[in-house]
Image (cartoon, rainbow, N blue to C red):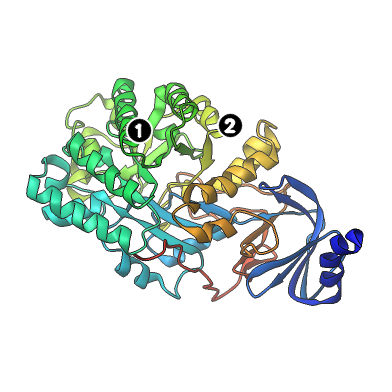
Amino acid sequence: MRILFLLLPALLAQSQTFDTVIAGGRVLDPESNLDAPRYIGINGGKIAAVSQSPLTGRATIDARGLVVCPGFIDLHWHGQDPETGRYQVMDGVTSALELEVGTADIDAWYAARAGKSILNYGASIGHAPVRMAVMHDPGSFLPAGPAAHRAATAVEIEQIKKLVEEGLRRGAPAMGIGAAYTDAATYWEILEMFRLAAKYHASVHVHIRGASSAALASTDRIRGLSEVIAASAVTGAPLHVVHVNSSGQDATAQMLEIISEARSRGLDVTTEAYPYTAGSTRIESAVFDSWMDRAPEDYQRVQWTATGERLTRETFLKYRKIGGNVIIHSNTEERVRLAILSPLTLIASDGFDIKNNTGHPRSSGTFSRVLSRYVRQEHALPLMDAIRKMTLMPAIRLQTRVPQMRDKGRIRVGADADITVFDPDRITDHSTYENPAQFSEGVRFVFIGGRLTVRGGKLVPGAHPGQPIRAPLR
């Protein structure tokens, strides 16, 4: 009787017809460590069966020779234009969230994307944009005026707290703090933000103070990391340190060691990395305030994305008045590799919109680059570990506050049918610093909520199945 009971789900699965069957692929599930050929049945946007035996579907995808895994989850994505999501989905991404900078108005942000997004989407309530609103900062994305350069008054801090708390009540999946861009904010103001996050069980995604591709001193980076670890310890708010490779630079190994030690003491601290030696930000932002008179070689490290040119002092000052994105060539492959291979890091792109073939290659090639370079070519990262960094780890980071994330990042019955199918022998990135608008190669099929967005390596025209990722409203 017990054997019949155990076999019953499989027998039932074989007797029914599914909306779609993914047949015979190498299924990797980082939660159960399953790595074996399986048949996956999808019904109503959910995984309804994972079977060793063939299943019947109204549509069938032949996945033999391909890897079938949960869709990649990008917790650090600045894309504002839904069309830019095409590059992400061709890189295997199914969910992309703006959790570092975030937004000042949660309801408006989600309403603007409803029914228009190819990807599942979400945004944090952002300390920086709220600070900009309260302090009437003229910056278009990052602070460029008083929100970057002036300490808030007691009254302004109360206004910031009120708006941030409203965002948490309205379902922001996390809180974003761009401390590097709001350096005038006092330690007390930042601590107040952590107190609010703890109250609502929200992780705090922080670009630490003193750390960017434009900064040079490692001591400031360590101080910035220590500030937010202390805030997490004092308040109990979960902490997520964004792009440890970019924030760390020559202190990357030290920062990873500190995070590891904090975790060993029971603190809920996580971090992320992207696989590129160059960072990117806005030239008018506060991180470049100290760049008015630098050595010529420092300006040469900065690339104006609109033209691809490397800067001089004259062109730096010119473009800073205009404002726009720059790429900063400031890191080494050794440090990046250290961060990518660390068991502490999940993979996140820090990507943003690609317009008129300008941008950063991380916006279109992050996940494929990890799989091609560090998994296939170097054999430095086991495939299952790479998939875990791209799927389960980001889902776990959010799932305490956002229960729907418990059904993402997994291949199991009842999980959301957000699934990426790729060729492990061909997957690779093609985007470059000079030509970022290049689709990755090797992602063969992508399902989002059970709907195909990539079929046979090509985008499905008009597919906008993306759904909001949002905490319960309070």
Q: Position of residue 331 (x, y in %)?
A: 43, 29
Query: Vertically, is 182 above or below 227?
Result: below
Residue 314, by quadrant, is top left
* Label 2 with label 1: CB-CB less than 8 Å: no
**Front in this rendered view, residue 459 or 111:** 111
Q: For the N terminus, which image quadrant?
A: bottom right
The residues tagged by marks 2 and 1 sit, at their Cα atoms, a distance apart of 26 Å
Query: Vertically, is 299 above or below 400?
Result: above
**Front in this rendered view, residue 340 or 170:** 170
What crowding class fits label 2: few (fewer than 14 Cα within 10 Å), some (14-19), or many (20 or more)?
many
Residue named by callout 2: 341
Query: Vertically, is 162 above or below 291?
Result: below
Q: Position of residue 34 (x, y in %)?
A: 75, 48
**As drawn, is 437 to the left or to the right of 192?**
right
Query: Vertically, is 379 above or below 126?
Result: above
Q: Which mark is residue 233?
A: 1
Q: Which mark is residue 431?
A: none
